[in-house]
Each structure stands twice: as C-alpha cells, then as structure tokens.
Image (cartoon, helix red, strand yellow):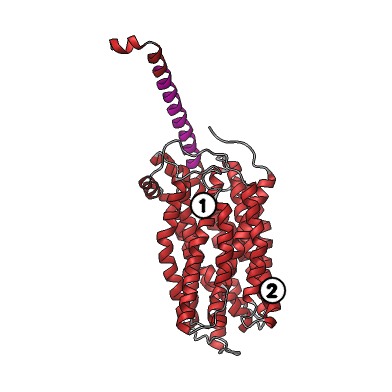
Amino acid sequence: MITTMKIPSRELWSYFGYGVGQCFSFGLVGSFINYFYTDVLGISALAASTIFLIARAWDAVHDPLFAIIMDIINSRFGKFRHFLLIAPLLITGVTLLSFYKIDASMTTKILYAGVTYILWGTLYAISDIPFWSMSSVMTNDSAQRVRVVTAAMLGVNVGIACANIFFPKLAAFFAQYSDDKGYFMAALIMMLVGLPLMLNGFVQIKERVPPSPEKVTIRDTFYNLRQNKPLFIVLLSFFFCVFHNVAGGLYIYFFINNLGDGSLQMAIGVMGILAAMLCLISPMLTRRMQKRKLFMILCGLDVSVRLVMWVVGYQQVTILFILLGLSTLFVMMTNILTSSMIADTIEYAEYHTHKRCAAITFSGQTFTGKMSVAVGGGLIGVFLTMIDYVPQEQIQKESVLSGLFFGICLLPAIGSLIRIAFMSLFTFTEEKHAEICRLLVERNMSAKILDNDCALSDKQNSVNPQTTRDM
C-alpha cells in the first residue's frame, strides 16, 4: 500500500535543520581543511593530498559496510532514525579534533591530520547514510518524497553556505587570541550551533514506511546494488562535481592572493543561501520537464557562465560574483535532481531483486560525495604544486594568480561537460519509474492475496483435520 500521508511542515523543517547542522561539518572540512593543513598546521600540499586519497580508499570499505548493517537491523526507533541520535555527538567531536593545531614534529602533524581526517570520514558516514535513507521511509508517495528530498538538499546547501559565510568571520575574530588563525574556536562555535539542530531532527523526524517483512541478508544488499544500473550512471554524474569541489577549495587561495581579501569567502556562502532559496522552484520545473533533460540543461548553462567568466576576467568583481552566483544555482539544482533520481532507483532495484535496500543505495551517494570532495582536495594539492604556489608567501607570482583563476573558472566547466556526457546515458525516466511503482503495487497485492489464501486454507485444515488425513 502506498503511504500518502502528508508530511507535516514542522517535520520537513526539522529534516532541513538536521541537514544544516550536519553540513556545518561538511562545509568546514570541504572548504577549509586543505588550507588549514597547508597554511596553519604547516604540512605540504602533497602530504594533504595523500591523506585525502588514503581516506577515500578506506571509505570504499566502511561506507557499504555501514549501509549493509543499516539495511539488516531494526530498533525500537525504526530502521534509520536511531542513528540520528548518536551521530551528531560523534561528528561534532571529530570535526573539532580535525581543526586542532598540535605542536609537534612534521611527521607527527601529518599522522595526526591523517588519523583525524580518516576518522571524520568514517563517523560522518554514520550520520549521512541514515540521513538520506530517511527520505525513503518518511514516505513512499512520489510527490511527498520530492518535498522531503528538496528539504534535505536545501538543508545541506544552507549548511555548507553558512560555513562559508560565518567561519571566516569567526576565524578572523579569534585569530588575535590564538596561533592557529582562529580556526579551532571558529569550528567550535559552528558545531555548537549545529549540534542542537541535528538533535532536534532526531526528535521530530518519523518513519512511516515499515521495513520489508522479508529478512534482508548481506548477500541481498550486494545483489541489490549490482542490479541497480541507473544508480551508477547518476553517481558518476554526481562524482564529477569534483572539479567544482576543486574550485571550492581554491576560492580561499584566490580571494587572498588575487583579490587581496580572504573574507570575500563569505560571499560564496551568501550566494549559496540565495541559490538554495531559488532552488525551491525545482519541484515545479520537474513537473514540466524530465529530470534528466533538466539536469543536462543546467550543466550546459554552467559551462556557458564559466566561459563568460573567463573572457570577462576577475578585475570586475561585481560581475565575477554574479556569474559565480549563477553557477552556484545551476550546480545546486543538479544536486537536488541527483538525490531525487537516486531515490527513484530504489524502486528499480526492488522490482528486479524483490528486496528493498535503501541504505546501500544512499551509501552510494554518501561515498561518492565524500570521494568527490576528497579527490577534489587531493587535486587541489596537485594543482597548487603545478602552478608553483608557495604557502605563506605574501606575494605570489603572476603565473600563480593566473593559475588560480583558471582553477576557479574553467575547471568546473570541464566537469559540467563530463556530467552531461554521463547523464546522456541515463534512461530510467519518470515514466518508467511510475510503471515500475505500479508493477510493485500489483506484485505486493498479489503476494498479500496469496498469503491470505494460504492462511485461510491452514485455518480450514485445522478446523477439519479429517480432510487432511484423507488426502
């Protein structure tokens, strides 16, 4: 039976709030950890890149492992909700450890950075996988699911945007009182604000879709994942935000060296919040256009904006930020479409495998998102090395400034072109999803009728045992 109960606005706001609080952490690590490593902790860009790549190798092991466990077990709180109670405490603690400057030898600093970053990625998965999986159990009505996914994605984008807005200002304020440019105290304030937002999400969010009556095994989850071919196309398209993530990590270098003002980083956060508000039109657009087609159009618009940016240059700061704002909007809307399409593939895999495994599906999004950020972080180190960036140098060479502008301008355009190429292979349209949902309902109803018939037959046999003996 399809769950059609409308999700209360209070619950959607709480789901949105959990995404905001969680992505304070994601925004801090995604935008500032590379700069913290090179210019505060003092380790090399290549050492930081190596840490990111090792962490992603470990993610390839633990993300699906956590998802399998989540798909198998249940608790009195439901299938995923109980994780939202413990995860906020864990990621708050590990985020603070990640931005703590230790006074030690270079080898010890590198080891500390590696351990805390890998631990951050591990604990973040315990929060992010159930957070997204909740969207599949809060409702299975397609219209309501779009509202839920939109609330979640807006929370994610607002959380990342707030990190970019407030963290630089907080760090600048506390810098006069510390030798770490104020990073630890700024991270502490951000996470103390995010923690109650996440805990409120646990209290308010409800699971309405009951788990499958059939026991799901480890083998089932892997088989379900292998059969979900549309999911892999969506994840590949999602991964190639990696070039936008490179640009996101280069912004702080660009603003400090090219524009002479690191506080301009907050403008990226402001644009993120404005773009998130404009993304509220996404459900209206998807009612008039296939998500696949809309995704490709938005990527094409991003390419166009980036080319104009390159031609205009960065001397016209107002025009630069307008173009960056448009690009932020286009990319943010593609990410909303990505999450919605991932949710749709759950029914695709369920139809082909007779098992519903939401966590293993959304673990793909969690892993791919972290992989994209980490590979982007690794490429930042390689890119800075290629353009001969010198950490803590007051005045960089002209070739370095040109390289930084290329990094924030044209690299994302390359990523959008690759995303268009992958999305052109995606054929699981809304019409096919609706048909599979209809077939699932019919199959479940047939199975229920068969179970009732068997139960009735067993009851009749128990009432008249002589009939059974005569057969």
Residue beneath the point at 63% across and 65% down:
191
- The CA span between labels 1 and 2 is 40 Å
Element on which disc 1 rests: helix
Q: Label 1: how many residues lie within 10 Å, few (<14), some (14-19) or many (20+)?
A: many
Badge 2 amino acid = Leu
Question: Which mark is on residue 292?
Answer: 1
Instruction: Give residue 56's quadrant in the image.
Output: bottom left
- Give the image location of residue 298, x and y in percent: 57, 59
- Give the image location of residue 5, x and y in percent: 62, 36
Residue 108 part of the magenta segment: no
In the image, which residues are magenta? 432-457
- Give the image location of residue 465, x and y in percent: 35, 12
Element on which disc 2 rests: helix
Badge 1 amino acid = Arg
Q: Nearer the viewer, residue 437 or 103?
A: 103
Helix, strand or loop: magenta stretch: helix
Residue 433 part of the magenta segment: yes
Residue beneath the point at 46% across and 55% down:
364
Q: Which residue is mark 2?
A: 170
Q: Is residue 192 at all visible to an observer of this figure?
A: yes
Instruction: Give residue 325's quadrant in the image.
Output: bottom right
Figure check: 72 above or below 126:
above
Left or right position of 98 against 200: left
Residue beneath the point at 45% across and 82% down:
107
Figure check: 135 above or below 141:
below
Figure check: 356 above or below 401:
above
